[in-house]
Structure formats: structure tokens, C-alpha cells
Image (spheres, coloured by chain):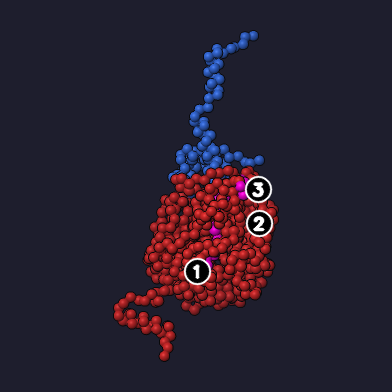
Amino acid sequence: MRTSVLPPALAVLVLVAAMWVPAWADDTAKADADAQNIFNSTCGWCHQGGGRVAGGIGPKLMATDKSDDFIVNRVKNGKEGRMPAFGASLSDAQIQALLRYIRNLKPES
Amino acid sequence: MTISKRLLATLLLGATALMGGVVPAIAQDKVSTDQLNNADKDGKDWLSYRGSYLDYNYSPLDQINAKNVKNLEVAWIHNPGRTKFGLQSTPLVVDGVLYYTASMSRVFALDGATGAVLWNFAPELDEALIAKQTHSPYNRGIAVSHGKIYVGTVDGRLFALDMKTGKKVWEQKLIDSQKETVGFTGAPLAVKDLVLIGSQGGEWPVRGAIFAVKADTGEKAWEFNPIPTDPKVDATWGNDSWKTGGGGAWQPGTYDPATNTVWWGTSNPAPLFDWAGDNWKTEGARPGDNLYTSSVVALDADSGKLKFYHQEIPHDIWDFDSAVGEFLMINDRGGKPLVVHPNKSGYVFVYNRPDASIVNVWRATENSNFVKDIDPKTGELVGRTSEKEGDNKDICPAFTGALGWPAGSYSPKTGLYYRPVTEACMNLKVAKTTPVIEPQAQLFVGAQFEVHGPNGQKPYGHVDARDPVTGKLKWQAKFPEYLLAAVMATGGNLLFVPDSRGWIHAYDAGSGKELWSHNDGDGHAGGLVSYMAGGKQYVAVEAGWGPLSGFGFAPTYGLPWTAMSMEAGSLVVYALK
């Protein structure tokens, strides 16, 4: 039986590749943590249970059938008399992170 | 020979008119300090937010009474249009003219007998700012004095209007709302030659304030910050947390002319919730008692200087602020002057009027566990619970408040204090958060939460008739949903209760027997008053659903809220057939 062995140079390359975390991944993780903070500090005032529950000031967000564009637009521009506009307060990256937060909502055990 | 003051004034007025001169100020001083000080004596008008400085939200009128209330019918209706977040204000009435506000600080002056519009005022507001605000653009009322109507705006201004024409006399910008996001929603309070108004705040990373401006010019006279720069106060805020500490004072307090003292309630600190657990004095988001948030403050009316205070909820972690306002000025049986103040926690504090020392503390809620008790002798929180990071389940009452801002009512005739109470609890998932203050302040809450009813029920409400000093219950009316509107007792032995479904009920104030009801077709979330016009008594109630606390009614209770507009409202005025 023949065992395949990587040449030493290639092995080092594979190891480095496995250890390397791209800068954008760092940014995404930071943005997601930031989104969690924004939600706990601001959005959760209206969207109960972190967005999992109906009955608050704002609607339930978990498993919403709204499109990404709709959600981004609503966060940016709000709706008169119902929801504030956050387009001037939050960056596009923060709003995208909030979108990921909403899409990843799962029922709490 | 002596000449009466009235005759002298008439002669002076006539002489001035003949000479073509300026009409003396005495003739223009409609709603004088004297009138305000004695507003409780004459029920024909409704001169301040809760009727008079006694804060009873009570009308002594008795033309409409327990015997004839069954003959009450709608006299006229006014629709203010463009209603956002419901109609939440309380009208004022002067000499048969009714003044009230709708959202966007729009003011209407109406003939009290017919509803004919005499004038209206719609300030041009910063709509871009309004689009970014959560607690906006509703308005909760106005003040009147010295010929002017005063109204605050959500973009941080205070307006004075000529009460005869509705024309602007002055405006004063008091808050940088474009930076701090919050503005004014509460009614101002007219005190002598000043107008006072408190800012929104609480769960915002900014410091709220109570402002006093001169009634004739709008020039700022003084400002009291609930988190003043003071070493004694700083020591109650660890880690410089005072800088983002909240503490607005969004509802008007009242005034005690005998001691020249303004009584006002301050709101909760920010962030709303805290992860410090039992170590809240030294750790967490804002270590310490957090003076003077969630407190009752007594201020010198002329200078705004703090005379004395009582912090009802030290280190408030439940949103049980004292900003509810409503300071019943009553005397005990021995004539000792007291002040009765409901706190959002469901406890009612009874104070000695000279120094806010505690006389008694009693509980209005049926469901409460955030403390074991509040010591009725000292006001100290006994067995307080703490919040830790993560899950904190079934805390009662909920942050929405057991005793909300819409006014209760005290009847000197029955000696009973009538108060809507909410029964609800909450689950909290507390998280460490940091405030967002750039480029514009954002809500600073610090938890995910869920409001639910006690013991597996849905949240519900009741109106209690109690002794205001002891809390002893005389009667109670239960409601399947909680109430978000004020109640009003009258000299006709009636208690009017507008409910969230849209019905207004009249009860026998002594026994609690329901005598009459009528459907206004829209949930109630504001105030109601009674007044005389053309020799006839009227009851005016605001019907208009859409308050923040009411947004959850549709998913929680279903009909009629699933079919109820959140963008409509009307002032409905009743009189006898």
C-alpha cells in the first residue's frame, strides 16, 4: 500500500492556509458582535425576546418572510408612526450584520 | 370713600381705551397666577394638566351625576387628522373654549359647546428627526397662563401661543434633539411667571432635564438636571456612568403655592437593565444608587434649586421610574399636609409635604416580586432582586409599569383614590452593552425582554378605589386588558373610565356599580376632562389608539385591536340629552 506524502514546502503552505483567518472574517465577527450589542441596546426595545416573540411594540422577526431588501430598507428608512429610521445612525455594514442576526434567529431552548 | 379694586380696574380700562392707549396687562391676564392657585375651587374650567395644582384629575361639577348619567349622549366630535401613536393628551378649558393637542404638537381651540374650530396651530417640526425617534411624535398636553398656551415639541422646542388667536408669541429651543434624539412629549406646567417642562429620557444615554422659562419672553430662567454635577451625586455613579445616565422627567409634576415648591418625578437611569447582580453598588453598568434618577424631587419654584428629595427606586434596574408625575396634595384626618405619588413599580408613596419624609408606602398590584416589600416606614426596598447577565425569568411587574403615566383621580367627596393598575410580568435576558451616542444617541436598554401575564394568564388590568393614605381597597373594576388612559371622578359621584377597547364607562364613585357606558369606536390612550359651556356640563374624552404600550395588543388579544387603526383618533364630547 502506498501512502501519499506531501512535499515539505506544500505541507507548510497547507498549514499556513489552515491557520490563516482572512481579515474580512475578523470584520464579520466584529460586526456580528456589534449587531448583537445594537439589538440588545436599541432594537430589543420594540422587538421582544431578541426578535423571537410577537406581542411587543414591533413585530416578531424570527422566520420573517420579508426579503433582505425589505428588511434593509425598513431599518434604513423606518416607517412613519411605526418604526424609526436608522440609516443615518448605522453603517451599511452594521445593517447587514443586523440582517444576519435576524436571519440566524432560532427559538431558545 | 373707598373704591373697589374691580371698579378701579374698570375705570382705568375705560380711561385707557378712551385715550386710545394700550390695554392694561390686567385685562389681558387671562388665567392669572391667582386663577391657577385656585383652579380646584371652580369646576367650570380645566386649567392645568390634572385639573389644578392639587393634581386630583377631578371635576367638582355635578350637573351630570349618578342619577342622570344614563341620559349622557355625544354632543360633538372633533377629528384632528394625522394621528400618530394615538391621542395621548389632556385638554384644557378656559371660559368655554377647549384647547387640546394631537400628535406633532398640533393645537386646536374649539368652542366647548359646539366643537366649532376657533383656531389651530401646527408647528413645522424637524420631520427627518421625527423619523429617527421611537417615542414620537405624540404629544401629551399643554399649559395655559397669562393669555398664552404652551406646548412642547419632539424636536426640543417650547412654544407660546396667543390663546385668543393661536398665533405664536415666542418659541425657545431647549434641547439639542438632533444630537440627543429626545425632545418634549409631556405637558408643560405653568407656575407664576414661569413655564416648566421636563425632557424625555430614561433609557437614553443622555442626561434629561427640567427647564423653566419666562412666560412672557421664553427666556430660560433655570434648569434642573436629575443628574447634576455634584460630588455627592457623582459618588452614586461608578465609572463616570453619570455621563450617559438618562434620568429625564417626561411628565409634568405639580406646584405647592403654600411653600413655593415644585414637585416633579424623574425617570429611570440608563441603561435600563444591569448585569451587576448583587454587586450593583460597586459593579455593572452604573454602580451605585444613581441619584437623582427614579426619584421625587422638590424644587424651589423661583430658582430650581433642590430643596429635598426621595429616591423611590435606588439603582433602578426595572424601569420603575418616578416620572409618572401625579402628586396628590391631600391632608390627613388631622389636617397634616401630605403628598401621594404612584411609582411605576406598583407601590404608592405617601409623603409628608414639608420634606418628603415617608408616611406610608402601599402596593396597588396583585402580582409583584421584584422586591419582597417596600418598608412603609422608611421607603427602603426590602429583599430586592438583582439581575445577572443572561436569563432572569418572571419578574413582576413588567418594565411597562404597573402604575402608568395616565392619571388616576382623587375625589374629595368620597375620599377615594381611583387608579388604573396593570398586571404583567417580564422575562429578561440581560446583556452587557455599550451606549451609542455618535452620531446620534440611540436607545440604551441592555437586555432582550418579553412581557407576559402573571401565572400563565395574559396581562390584565383593574381600576381600584382605595384610601389614598392607607391603600385600603373599597372597590375594584377588572378589565381583561390593561388600561392606557386616565380616569376622572366628578362631584356628581361618578368615576369615568375610558378603556382600551374604546368604551367609556361611568361608575358610581362610592360603590363601583357601573351606571353607563358608550363605545367611542377607538381605544383610549389619553385624558378626559369636564367643564361648563353655556351653562351646560360636558365631558370630553380622547379616543385614539396607537400608544407604544398598545402596539402589542393586536398580537396578544386579537380583536378589536387587529381591526383598530393606529393612525386615527377623535375628541368625543358628551352632554346630557
User: Which is nearer the N-term, disc 1 or disc 3?
Assistant: 1
Residue B184 screen position, x and y as percent: 47, 58
- Which residue shows up at 57% across the image and 38% down it? A104
Q: Nearer the viewer, residue A61 or B405?
A: B405
Q: Write down the residue under mark 3.
A: B278
Amino acid type at image mark 2: Leu
Outermost residue on the front side: it is B231
Relative to B26, B559 lies left or right: right
Region rendered in magenta = B260-282
Q: Write down the residue under mark 1.
A: B48
> Does residue B568 sit above or below A96 in this rendering?
below
Which chain corresponds to the colour red?
B
- Which residue shows up at 56% across the image and 65% down it? B326
The Cα–Cα distance between marks 2 and 3, rounded to whole angstroms, is 14 Å
Q: Is residue B85 magenta?
A: no
User: Which is nearer the N-term, disc 1 or disc 2?
Assistant: 1
